[in-house]
Image (spheres, coloured by chain):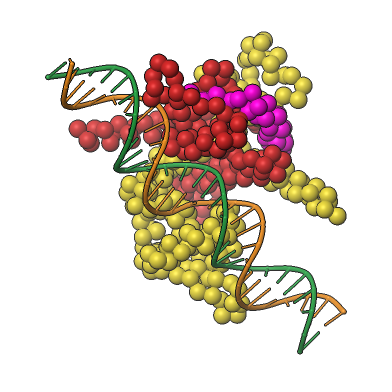
Chain colours: A red, B yellow, C green, D orange
Amino acid sequence: METPSSSLILDRETKASERPGDHKDELRLWLRLLTCSTLIETEIRNRLREEFKTTLPRFDLMAQLDKTAVGMTVGEVSQRLMVSNGNVTAVVAGLVTDGLVDKRSAPQDRRVQILTLTAQGRKVFRAMAERHEDWIAELFAGLEQTDRGQLFRLLGQTKTSLHRAIAGRAEDAAKGDA
Amino acid sequence: METPSSSLILDRETKASERPGDHKDELRLWLRLLTCSTLIETEIRNRLREEFKTTLPRFDLMAQLDKTAVGMTVGEVSQRLMVSNGNVTAVVAGLVTDGLVDKRSAPQDRRVQILTLTAQGRKVFRAMAERHEDWIAELFAGLEQTDRGQLFRLLGQTKTSLHRAIAGRAEDAAKGDA
DNA sequence: AGAAATTATTTTAAGCCTAAAATGTTTTTG
DNA sequence: CAAAAACATTTTAGGCTTAAAATAATTTCT
């Protein structure tokens, strides 16, 4: 008699998914998470292009700058967006050319570049953000509100799990260096 | 740092998130989903590079080919991976150069290109896949098994919701063309 | 059969993205 | 104070990605 894993599954499947060291369930979970993420991202990209002739990276960057009145440094944006510094530099260059973002070095520390939305940038972003919010709501509309809450909660725990696993491994690597 | 989701929220926040036409909750849900997805993806990219000197797109492409004995067409791979045809063409070119993938036009229909893993490709992939499976399990290890099940189920519903919303909009566009 | 439509893939042009090296600036340290 | 270390950003080189146009092959229609 084998230990039943979660609930009523067929014998063959039970055996298959209980091989020692097997992690097919986690793999399926990740694939499904990725599928959802990709579907949303692709759809948003398409709509941003069709409706506003812009791209998701530009939108995301402007979204960060919209959250502050005083501006943000390149490093700060790069951290929040989880992309490289060089990437921010490049995307910002385009936005500056288009007059949507302003970039100037901080007076106290000339290493730092302060990024802000221009007046036009803020106006353009706000219009896009409103539509964007509707699109996202539309995409999740097939989910009950309680399920959305559940999902939000579970993704929170997932985030915690991920951060712990990733930080743990970084520590190991640091130990290895010593 | 994060706003509480469904239950006990402060009056001011309740008001703020109940403005007519407001969809901040869905937005937060999407952002959290994206964060999880990005964290996993980045970590897997890093480990594939460090441990196998390869990239995620290559790994993903080989994973598709590993699922079949008879090979797959460019279009089929592109559909499953949810990337453009041109992208598959480009990534395959690299894999062919490295002797991991074989590409030949189908004898009955010379438009079609049949892609298969070479013997070496299959061997290399299997080794990577085993490690990959462990990495994913490790990343989700902080989640209870019942929570993983819940999450899997909810993401299934999310997928359904997304497909419906996206298909619905495509129909509208088609109607507009007529 | 021959023209037109469809299908599968590739090419092209442009933008995104990263890691690693380089640059310029500030802080720390001997 | 000067050298070294740390820091913030940019540059570089290379790979990924897409949409749209181009190419090539097959199928459909008349």
Image: D21 above or below A146: below
Instruction: Tell me if residue A123 is in the magenta stretch.
Output: yes
Name the image quarter holding residue A131: top right
Q: Is residue B178 left or right of residue A170?
A: right
Give, as a single range, the part of the protein colored magenta: A114-142
For this orientation, the residue located farthest to the top is: B11
Number of numbered callouts drawn: 0
Image: A58 above or below B168: above
The quarter of the image holding the C terminus of chain A is top left
Residue closest to the eye, A135 or A37? A135
Residue at 64% over, 40% down: A54
Residue closest to the eye, D22 or B114? D22
Residue at 56% over, 64% down: B74
Residue A20 % position (x, y): 38, 49
Note whether residue B66 is visible.
no
Q: Is residue A130 left or right of residue A102?
A: right
Q: Is residue B131 left or right of residue B164?
A: left
Residue B88 % position (x, y): 53, 60
Instruction: Tell me if residue A164 is in the magenta stretch.
Output: no
Residue at 43% over, 37% down: A86
- Which secondary structure is most common in the magenta stretch? helix
Residue closest to the eye, A81 or A167? A81
Note whether residue A34 is visible.
yes
Name the image quarter holding residue A119: top right
Residue at 40% over, 66% down: B97
Residue B176 % position (x, y): 83, 49
Residue B145 % position (x, y): 49, 36
Image: D10 above or below B168: above
